[in-house]
Amino acid sequence: MTGRPHPGPGRTDAELAAVQAEALYVMDDEGVLTAVNDVGRPAPARCFLSRTRASVRVWTSAELPAATAAAIRAWAAAQPPVEDLTEVAEVPAEVARLVAGHRPVTDTFVGPAFAVLDPLASPELPGLRFEVCGPDRAEVFRADFPEVTATLAERQPTVAAFDGDRPVGVCCSARVGRWACEAGTETLPEYRGRGIASALVARWAEQVEATGRTALYSTEWDNHSSLAVARRLGLPLYAVNINLY
């Protein structure tokens, strides 16, 4: 990643792409991906692209030869602007060819990236209460969200929806970077379809903004329930994420 992202709220799409990359991945001083920014530091994608309307940003891991990384950046620099990001739904064939030339591509991830900037107001949901949950609340999630119990300290801020004393939905900081946090939401099956995820994301974003970071939300194109959350909140689409493993 070249240059320091602007830390303020008025970021351009390119700046949002940069702060998201820094939240999603651990990088060295040269911007080379070294790990996923998650508990246990899993291996990163070999190539991560952020396609904004104006340009394509590229980050690669040390697994890719320097010549391959340079060829991908040259391809990115030659790409024209796009008007409609919803049409960016597949891995670019030339990038797939270049990455596979080093070693076969085993998995890909393509999907939209949204900024949670001034989300639409989320109504109160009768019968439920929403709470900010610090690390001291980890045990309340053990029965229904055991992964949250195990990682709550690393996923702050976190907001949960409770039906009585039972947590029925949660929005955690799935990735925490210096300038941005990425949302991760889950709702119990029997409570889905009530707008809980949207309400959680809106409240979580308020907590993220209070830390001076930008709240981000991304998903895959075929995750229709997750896309519905973005629509309900009126979240602006600033990029499409493309990962090759």
Image: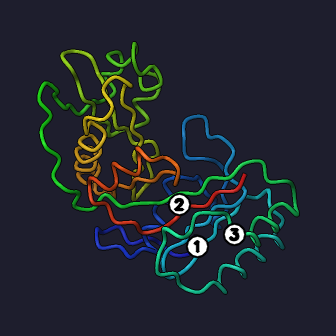
Does 12 sit left or right of 98 as displayed? left
Q: Amino acid at mark 3?
A: Pro
Which of pointers 3 and 1 lies earlier in the amino acid sequence?
A: 1
**Would you name the residue on which mark 1 appears?**
57
Q: Nearer the viewer, residue 126 or 186?
A: 126
Say which residue appears at 66% left-offset and 79% top-offset: 76
**Secondary element at image label 2:** helix
Estimate the x, y position of residue 28 in percent, counting from the top left. Answer: 64, 59
Say which residue appears at 37% left-offset and 25% top-offset: 188
Label 2 to label 1: alpha-carbon separation: 10 Å
**Would you name the residue on which mark 3 appears?**
92
**Would you name the residue on which mark 2 appears?**
21
Q: Nearer the viewer, residue 151 or 244?
A: 244
**Secondary element at image label 3:** loop
Res 236 quadrant in image: bottom left
Which of pointers 2 and 1 lies earlier in the amino acid sequence?
A: 2
- Depth check, mark 3 against mark 1: the one in front is 3
Q: Specify few, some or many for label 2: CA neighbours under 10 Å numbering under 14, 14-19, or 20 or more.
A: many
Q: Amino acid at mark 1?
A: Arg
Label 3 to label 2: alpha-carbon separation: 19 Å
Q: Amino acid at mark 2?
A: Ala
